[in-house]
Image (cartoon, rainbow, N blue to C red):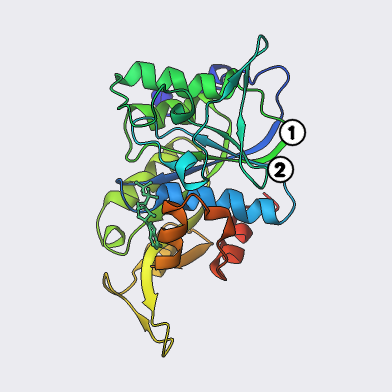
Amino acid sequence: CKERTAPQNMKEALHPQAEVRKVIAVVSGKGGVGKSLVTSMMAVAMRRKGYETAVLDADITGPSIPKTFGIHGRAMGSEEGIIPAKTRTGIQMMSVNLLLGDETDPVIWRGPIIANTVKQFWSEVIWNNVDYMFVDMPPGTGDVPLTVFQSLPVAGILVVASPQELVSMIVEKAVKMAEMMNVPVLGLVENMSYFECPDCHKRHAIFGESHMDEIAARYGIANVAKLPIDPELAKLCDEGRIEEYSGSWLEDMAGMVQGL
Ligand code: ADP
């Protein structure tokens, strides 16, 4: 079916002064499962490995990423284009929150305007020599995710879900959408997979036992990662200090995209 795959000539052109080598989209079936958090931590993990990384926040109506990095300023415009914001460790970032007069203003735009904004984040921002760009996608399989897949040269996707979603069809829909767009699924991330007791180090599956391996096997997804519920992580997010987090799972996450 012709509708299903985007011909190459529909891709948006990158800004002439920009350079982006690999674009990885982070998707989820629904909101609130930690998609933005995973997007941010991917950029942090790869930055620590010495790569130039960037975050394109395409979750336009629920942008939360700049705050978790402690960025409250505005993106700078120049005659030539938009200069992305930079985090403390040098991650480049573009989000609608960096354009709003007041970051608590709601974004009440219709689908086509949202989709166009995402395209502009690609074509009008002067991304500087980026090795890995992580795109925080809007949840679900609607209009905007479709536009992103059609307009940006997405090299692969990461699917984020909680243990509860991994027993429903939501995740499978996201995986099938990627297949229809001819984009490989690089990995499946089960967020809030368990809580490790700080005293006895026993792991508790708060939201039920994991079905991640089963789903990964069904769709031939080679890489899987399990993220714990970590109050320290939530605290650092709230305080805008996400770049200071350390957790052993970050290495698994980096492995999903490194060498892509
Ligand atoms: P989404 O992008 O899927 O809507 P977010 O990444 O914004 O979800 O996460 C929702 C909230 O849950 C955030 O406040 C985040 O700090 C918190 N959170 C997500 N994952 C974890 C985790 N593994 N441990 C602790 N808090 C988490």
Residue type (three-letter) at the residue carrying disc 1: Asn
Q: Is residue 132 above or below residue 163?
A: above
Disc 1 is placed on an element classified as: loop
Residue at x-position 60% and y-position 21%: 76
Circle 2 crowding by C-alpha within 10 Å: few under 14, some 14–19, many from 20: many
**Which percent across, then down, holds residue 29?**
32, 46
**Which percent across, then down, holds residue 240?**
49, 49
**Which percent across, then down, holds residue 71?**
52, 39
Q: Which residue is mark 1?
A: 129
Report how far apart the C-alphas of labels 2 and 1 lie in the structure.
7 Å
Ligand 1 in which quarter: bottom left
Residue at x-position 56% and y-position 52%: 42
Residue at x-position 49% and y-position 58%: 221
Residue type (three-letter) at the residue carrying disc 2: Glu
The answer to which quarter of the image holds residue 92 is top right
Q: Is residue 92 left or right of residue 150?
A: right
- For the residues labelled 2 and 1, say whether their Cβ atoms are less than 8 Å apart: yes
Identify the image quadrant of the N terminus.
top left
Q: Which residue is mark 2?
A: 52
Whichever of labels 2 and 1 marks the residue nearer the N terminus, that label is 2
**Which percent across, then down, holds residue 156?**
55, 44
Q: Is residue 92 above or below residue 203?
A: above
- Identify which residue, 223 or 132, lies in the foreground: 132
